[in-house]
Amino acid sequence: MNQTTQAKQILKIILPTPFPVGDVNVYLIKGERLTLVDAGPKTEEAWLSFQHQLKEYGYTPDDIEQIIVTHHHPDHVGMLDYFDHNIPVFGHPFNKPWLKKDEGFLQAQARYFEQLFLIFGLNENFLPSIQKLNDTLEYSCNRKLHHELVEGMEIAGLPGWLVMETPGHAQSHIVLYEEKTGILVGGDLLLKDISPNPLLEPPMIEGAIGRPKPQLQLNNSISKLLDLSLSIVYPGHGENIEHAHELIAYRLKKQAERAELVKGFLQKKHLTAFEVCKALFPTIYHKQLMLTMSETVGQLDYLEDNGQIKIDETNTPALYYAVEK
């Protein structure tokens, strides 16, 4: 399928967000049902921009027959609140507590991170910032997930499109793949100009042993794409990606190099995760605690998984140290 045909099948809409990442991309797929993939943040500016661009394509919001969310982050789901509540919403089941802003879930998340960050060596003075983790949910929604999407499912109204579970940036993350064209609607799995943050989240499965390790998940998720024939990737932010396999190799290489930097810190002395974070991000760690800690812990998880470092969990906080070979 050539680029012109692809353009007729998939319509890109670029929306402003209040977040540092900048604009977000949402997509209309013209299948048996007119399907919107992702919904932008809950702001009047984004909604007005969406309606204007939709009109240029010859549609109104009432023409949209179903909505799929690639993951639960506010810049991808907030505008769901502006749509008719009869429009079915599809996504991974892990979206549910986020879309509904389940108060019990959000409180449990805060308690989880308070305990986790003490293990990582954060000073208790930083713990109040954990209560701010959900501040961005003001740009999210309060909606029901009507239909669950999991690995290998074909989507109603979009024959030939398959769901792939791709956790890492979010535990709820999925992408949509059409094998006959090689098109991937990729959410935030792979971005052209920046590497998605592998964000720390609490376990989403009750009774799960251990925490999710998002950097390892992200590496595995993008590596799955190497087995696919990809003509183009439509990402959640930035420009379309036409040479995805090359970009994936580059992303994996840069991440491994970043991990080597972290290993260098640990070859000098034993450190807590928070001490590593301050070494990696000396000027911004206190302003963007979750982002910088997620990045740091991701590199530590990678090194531990490769057998290059170990963790002494005898006491709290835990200490990381390099393995001599």
Image (spheres, rainbow, N blue to C red):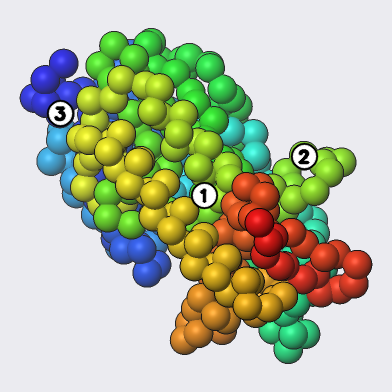
Q: Residue furthest right?
A: 314
Q: Earlier in the sequence, mark 2 or mark 1?
A: 1
User: Mark 3 — residue?
Assistant: 7
Tell me the element at label 1: loop
Q: State the SS at label 3.
A: helix
Q: Where does residue 115 sit, x and y in percent of width and height?
A: 82, 68
In the image, residue 131 sits, relative to residue 81, either above or below, namely below
- Amino acid type, residue under disc 2 in the picture: Ile
Task: Answer left or right for 90 relative to 250.
Answer: right
Under mark 3, the amino acid is: Ala
Disc 2 target residue: 205
Quadrant assignment, res 228: top left
In this picture, residue 172 sits left or right of residue 52: right
Above or below for 181 versus 282: above
Q: Which residue is mark 1?
A: 169
Q: Quadrant of residue 95?
A: top right
Q: Residue at x 43, y 58 (%)?
A: 257
Q: Secondary structure at mark 2?
A: loop
Rendering coords of residue 321 (x, y %): 71, 67
Which callout, 2 or 3, points at the residue further toward the start of the chain?
A: 3
Give whichever of discs 3 and 1 has the lower sequence position.
Answer: 3
Q: Give how far apart the Cα atoms at labels 2 and 3 are.
A: 39 Å
